[in-house]
Amino acid sequence: MIKDIINKKRIGLELTKEELDYFFNGYLKGNVKDYQMSSLLMAICINGMSFDEVINLTDLFINSGDTLNYEEKFGTMCDKHSTGGIGDKTTLVVVPIVASLGIPVIKMSGRGLGYTGGTIDKLESIPGFRTDLSEDEILESINKCGACITGQTKDIAPMDKVIYTLRDVSGTTSSIPLIAVSIMSKKIALGASKILLDVKYGSGALVSTIDEAKELGELMKKIGSKYNREVRYILSDMNEPLGMSVGNSLEVMEAIVVLSNKIDSKFKDLCILLSSNMISMVKGISLEDAKKLAINSLESGKAYNKFLEIVKNQGGDINKLDVSKNIFEYKALKTGTISKIDALGVGKLSLSLGAGRVNKEDNIDYSVGVILNKLSGMEVKKGDTLMSIYYNNSNFKIDDNIIEIK
Ligand code: URA
């Protein structure tokens, strides 16, 4: 039976609900082995899935764990999810903007596995910041300051956890239906009726082209409508790192600069776009009107104050944020214009510094990372500092092609 199911998918046939159930729940029970599941996942990667298969698998993932419903208490809510990238700290800016407008936000985020820390790791670089709020503490936080950013309280889609771990080591992460099932099962289980997805493409993302990102976004939207969720997605470029910093404390500092409305940047623009979409969905207003509200929240200091409130409520002290004192300045070898900064290269560099994890158990060094002193399109002179590398261990590796000058 196990072999028959793998063979059926290998020759491109559609699996029934019963077959998917037998195989995936069998895996959770230990009756289907890692090598058999890897084989099926690879067949899915190669042959894809029908929409019926996608929905049946999403159901299995959702039903493998708990489901939440905070809307019963707080009314319409909007969740956000990014498909991940290098230097992605948008949650740190977007949640305070949205919450500053009286829209309750419960953001349950994850840790990173891969090149950089996840949102939870970034927040834990703020000394004292607690990311393990209990359900009572979440309710208290919403009543007190309207928002919280925390790890998951319950076991949400545990089937995704085990399958994702296997995908990560079996070359099966980039399958569009598998990504869509993985993301949407978690978002649906978390309960918000509005979902905003930031779908990334490029060298630092799971899918490389804008067309693939669009296909993924459309599929997730279609899954959402099957579960009565309003889903919007935006497509964003992840060929270059997002913003000027990569690394946990450094990214929190950059988020604070944006929240203080001190600089304009592509990163800030993306945060405004994401916030505007969330505000527009919850308030049922046009994107244009929502954008005005988001910008006003930043300009008036409301978003920054909300961030401080959230940090204080969760026990953090931003005055104690720490970065390494050891800084290596990576200089331009020639004069010219920066034509490319490779997101994947910067991600690998930050991993070698200790800013991310190779294995789940690895400890992160919050104080290390990279600041990009120059961005794409800027003119530089030979000897200018291109990157400031914050390190504690000098064994980091800089790929020769990280920054291209023409
Ligand atoms: N994020 C997820 O949660 N799952 C994927 O498969 C990819 C990105």
Image (tube, rainbow, N blue to C red):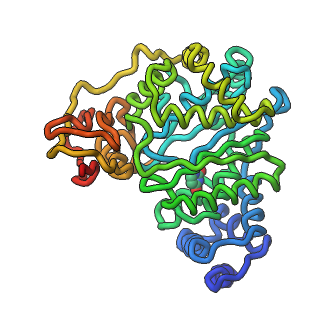
Specify the quadrant that holds the N terminus: bottom right
* Location of residue 140 by image quarter: top right
Residue at point 31% right, 50% down? Answer: 339
Query: What number of labels is visible?
Result: 0
Pick the residue in front: 321 or 127: 321
* Rendered image quadrant of residue 141: top right
Residue 70 percent coordinates (x, y)? 78, 32
Res 11 quadrant in image: bottom right
- 306 up-or-down from 337: above or below: above
Q: Residue at x 24, y 24 (%)?
A: 325
Give the left or right position of residue 72, taking residue 178 as reference. right
Residue 217 visible somewhere in the drawing:
yes
Tell me, yes or no, if residue 141 can be seen here.
Answer: no
Residue closer to the observer: 298 or 369: 298
Between 399 and 67, the residue placed more toward the observer is 399
Q: Residue at x 50, y 57 (%)?
A: 206
Residue 157, image x, y percentages: 68, 50
Residue positioned 21% across, 35% down in the render: 385
Q: Is residue 373 left or right of residue 193?
A: left
In-image side of 165 versus 257 (left or right): right
* Location of residue 58 with respect to 127 vertically, above or below: below
Name the foreground residue: 368 vs 305. Answer: 305
Q: Position of residue 217 (x, y in %)?
A: 65, 55
Horizontal and vertical percent position of residue 204: 43, 52
